[in-house]
Each structure stands twice: as C-alpha cells, then as structure tokens.
Amino acid sequence: MPSVPKAGAKHGGIGESADSVGRMEFLLTLRRRGIADAAVLRALDEVPREEFVTPNYGDAAYADQALPIDCGQTISQPYVVAYMTEQLEVGPEHHVLEVGTGSGYQAAVLSRLARDVVSVERYRTLAEAARRRLEKLRYHNVTVVLGDGLAGLPANAPYDRIIVTAAAESIPQPLVDELAEGGIMVLPLGPHDDAQRIVKLTKTADGIEREDLIWVRFVPLLPGQAREL
C-alpha cells in the first residue's frame, strides 16, 4: 500500500460504477504506462474501485494515485496495482497469498485471476471492513485473515503466488518458506524512510532468483498483529 503523494459496467449486482469517463481514462492510462496483459486489464476493469475508497475520496477513485484509508494505510495507485499484478503472473490454477489486505482492492483484482486468494491483515478494523466489502461484492474466493503478515499463513501453505503490499526492509524468510517451488513472490523491498524497489522472486529447485524492478514508496511492513484498530 504505497504512501499517499476516477465503462460504467455493472459488477456483481452492485449497480453502476463511478464516472465512466474517469474509468475509461483509468484504463487508457494503464495501457499508456505499459500494462499489456489483457487478463490483468480485464480484472482491473471488472473491479469497482470506487467501492474500496473512503466516501470523501470517491471522485478520485480512478485517478492514478494512492489514496488514504483507515489506520494510516493507503489504497495503492492503480498503476502500481496493475504492475505488481502483471509481474505476479497469476493463472486460474493459482493459490495466492496477499500480505496486507488494506481496503481489499488488490485482493479483489487477484480474485478475478486466481483460483483463490488468502489475504492477511494486521489491523482488525481493515480486516473486518474488507471482509464485509468483499462479501458484498461477491468475491467468494477471497478469505481475509487477521494476523501477522510477516509470518504469513503457514496453515494454508504452500502458495503458488505471494504478493506483499507494504515495504519490507529485508526478504521475509517465512514467506519464502511458504512459497511453492516454481512460485513467484512480488514485494516492495527497501528502507521504510526512503524509496524502495519492487522485487520479483522466483523459487527454484536451486534457490531464489531475484529481479529488481521499478522504484516505489510504500508504507512499512510491520511485525505482529496491531494491538489497536
């Protein structure tokens, strides 16, 4: 969830999405910026982003920027969501772990691509709100769990794909351990007080292959379950 710097189709019976002109511009911007995977673009088109932002930011739902949500967290800008999702190379057979549920937007996008998604969130407020939102929108293949994202969810491992939506200062070994052989993990890596790189890790029989990608700035990935909120 980066730190903070809109075709009105029906989805899941919820009704018309936000301003159709803003939504079209949103998709065009993603294409202009290099997002080419048709399945990823379709997933982003299907998910009503306006349902995942706070009401006072509804007019900016499809702008290419991060927006604040509860607990001092953010909903990632659409380009970063699209980019990380594309790099994750999700297929319909994949069992996916997301670390950092936030509003549930990234999990909703992944749900359109994967067999199922398990998402772990350290803040109770965010986990409960995301669970209600995803149920309302009928994303029945997403499970939200309250817990420590740095520890992952070993009970549901191994995972074919893992995505981390907050910045880790080092590669979390428990998440590497929970990744299936041949699996891919995408995460922002770097200092909490400076820019980070999106890193793509592929687990092979011989170890971990690493690819450093774009520069970003995310909120920090913190250990443990939050005592409050």
Image (spheres, rainbow, N blue to C red):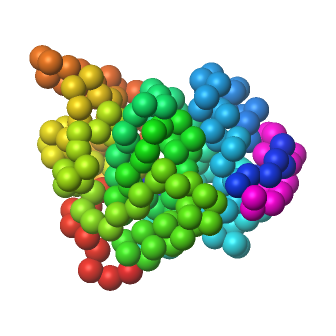
User: Magenta residues?
Assistant: 13-25
Identity of the residue furthest to the bottom in this view = 228
Along the horizontal axis of the image, is 164 left or right of 157? right
Who's the residue at 56% across and 54% down the image? 139
Looking at the image, which is closer to me, 71 or 43?
A: 43
Q: Residue 82 appears at what percent x and percent y? A: 56, 37
Who's the residue at 46% across and 53% down the image? 142
Who's the residue at 27% across and 23% down the image? 182
- Is 19 included in the stretch rendered in magenta? yes
Along the horizontal axis of the image, is 221 left or right of 66? left
Look at the image and tell me in which quarter the N terminus lies: bottom left
Decide if residue 76 is in sight here: no
Looking at the image, which is closer to me, 163 or 43?
A: 43
Along the horizontal axis of the image, is 67 left or right of 221? right
- Is 22 included in the stretch rendered in magenta? yes
Decide if residue 7 is in sight here: yes
Q: Residue 213 appears at what percent x and percent y? A: 40, 27
Q: Residue 95 appears at what percent x and percent y? A: 37, 39
Q: Is residue 15 above or below residue 212?
A: below
Write down the quadrant of residue 37 in the picture. Answer: top right
Q: Residue 200 appears at what percent x and percent y? A: 34, 29
Looking at the image, which is closer to me, 226 or 177?
A: 177
Who's the residue at 38% across and 80% down the image? 229
Q: Is residue 105 above or below residue 57?
A: above
Q: Is residue 194 above or below residue 18?
A: above
Write down the quadrant of residue 59 in the picture. Answer: bottom right
Along the horizontal axis of the image, is 220 left or right of 22? left
